[in-house]
Image: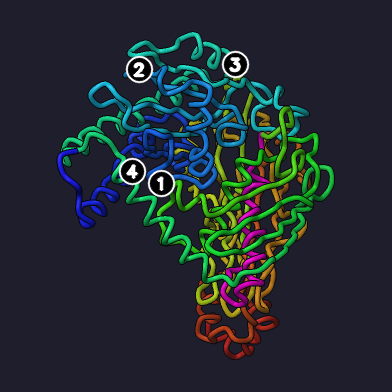
Amino acid sequence: MTAKLDIVAQNVLWNRLISVCEEQANALMRAAFGAIVREAGDLSAGVFNSDGAMLAQAVTGTPGHVNTMAASVNAMLHVVPAENLKPGDALVTNDPWLGAGHVFDFVVVTPAFLDGKIIGFLASTSHIVDVGGRGWSAESASVFEEGVTIPVMHLRRGKELNEDLLRIVTTNSRVPHEARGDILSLLTCNDTGVARLIDLMGEYDLTDLKEVSDFIFGRSAAGTKSALARAPQGTYENHMQLDGYDAPIELRAKMVIGDGRIDVDLTGSSPAVNRGINCPLNYSAAYAAFGIRALLAPDIPNNQASLDAILITASPGLVVSAERPSPVSARHVIGQALPDLMLGCLEQALPGEVLAESSGALWTMSLSGAGKTPFTSLNVALGGMGARPTLDGLSTTAFPSGVGAVSVEVSENSAPLIYHSKQFAPDSGGPGQYRGGLAQRIEIGSGIYEDMTLSAAAFERLTTGPSGRSGGKNGSAGKVTITNGSQIKDKGLYTIPAGERLVLQTPGGGGFGNPINRDRKTVARDLSHGLISNNVAQSIYQLTKTQTEETQ
């Protein structure tokens, strides 16, 4: 580089790197074929230095994608060393234990060359709707049944695409055109990032990223250490129970808060099961670390240094540390519950400062038809976020994943489905001084009067709803039925007969604080807006009958 950058220039450059990642993510969303990426933002994008350490990430994306990707780049470079890469090359894998936890997520890594040497890497991850096997079903007994796994290899050499690889994926996919397009969209995403990164380095007359890496990592490490110090040092333990598949699952955590770092051991959680709800440790660590950072260090940018302050471990072979060939298709069921497990530990360290439990795992809806009009449709239903110490929880918000839902209009346009209703579920948010976020009720039917198959019934919290805190009440449990009277209680495969509809009500977020302390005008407002019923207003919030009638 021609001159040492001052602190102002370093900060500007740091923010410019984040904007490079955002442009990556936007390019991916524009190019993606699958609606779950294009419409819901189920992706990640990031810039890495020449050592494979994450410098910056896009704001758009999920913790499960971003935080696993932080480790994926070095894992992939261990298989194909950087010295073997040439301009235009790109690596790819969907190995769950190297990438984002299941075979549907592909990671692509592209080196950025300047004057013949690698100065960094651009990486991205997104969801491919179908790669064969049993698809989204959690019924597989091993990862071999869940779809084709691609080991780390070249997706492109120079300007030459690896068409053999693409043919393997498309031959195994029920939607080959979409699968190919989504993989190539990752290439486009990274190529956009490489071009912007090289332009940025030229603007600042940089020949490498070493100085800005040192600045970013130094500031992030110091900021993270200071932020973590807010929690008193000590050992804190928490456990929670999930519905599981054939039997309930126990999650346990032992958190040790030290001087500027936090170590969490998940040993004690249930053993891995022979259903696809197991979670590789890389994905468990991604979401567990996010839960800690969301509370203690939300303002510290996510990068290698800020992540290094948190270590998540577990003995092998558990539902949170599954080993190959355990099935992992619905790993989000376990992984997305871990932030609440972490927050339960931190609530002991910081009583009264931690939000209530949220609905946790996304409810994935993989609907397909094999009749005269074959189709596959993937969407998500969102539950409520837990109430915060000073604010209500957000309704129908995917915490912790941050993913949005595919809109009704797009879903109905891309598959022969009819969304007969999609609305807030009254009384679903846990009562409290601050109410939990509301769940939603969705009713879906076939638009062509044919049977449909629900193959991703990985619904959680059907038994008990998310817990409240500090006197707040639990959010409502979820419920799934078919209009013929059938009730869905597990994570298997279901047929929705022609003429019938699938009816889902997601879990609501837990409440915070004693409901009696909720502002009376706010209770009346909730009642007038239909968010709570007369019964809840009077029996739990103790609004008088006269006050209730005045809202009608």
Point out residue 356 in the picture as x, y percentages from the top left corner. 62, 68
Q: Amino acid at mark 1?
A: Thr
Asked whether the beta carbons under mark 3 and mark 4 sit within 8 Å of each other, the answer is: no
Cβ atoms under marks 3 and 2 closer than 8 Å: no
Residue under numbered circle 1: 60
Position in image of residue 13 (x %, y %): 25, 48
Image point (51%, 29%), residue name: 106
What label does residue 86 carry, if any? 2
Query: Residue at coordinates 53% horizontally, 85% vertically from top-left?
Result: 519
| Vertical side of 53 occupied by 477: above or below | below
Residue 444 lies in what quarter of the image?
Answer: top right
Asked if the residues shown at circle 1 and circle 4 are in contact, with their CB atoms under 8 angstroms apart, the answer is: yes
Q: Nearer the viewer, mark 2 or mark 4?
A: 2
Neighbour tally class for label 3: few under 14, some 14-19, many 20 plus, Cα within 10 Å:
some
The residue stretch that appears in magenta: 329-356
Q: Nearer the viewer, mark 3 or mark 1?
A: 1
Callouts 2 and 1 close, C-beta under 8 Å: no
Question: Which type of secondary structure does the marked residue at label 4 adopt?
Answer: helix
Q: Which residue is mark 3?
A: 172
How much space separates mark 1 and mark 4, taking CA atoms?
Answer: 7 Å
Q: What's the amino acid at mark 2?
A: Lys
Label 3, label 1: how far apart the Cα atoms are: 29 Å
**Sequence order check, earlier mark of 2 and 1:** 1
Q: Which of the two residues, 264 or 96, is positioned nearer the viewer here?
A: 264
Q: CA distance from mark 2 to mark 1?
A: 29 Å
Earlier in the chain: of badge 3 and badge 1, it is 1
| Quadrant of the drawing holding the N terminus | top left
Q: Which residue is mark 4?
A: 22
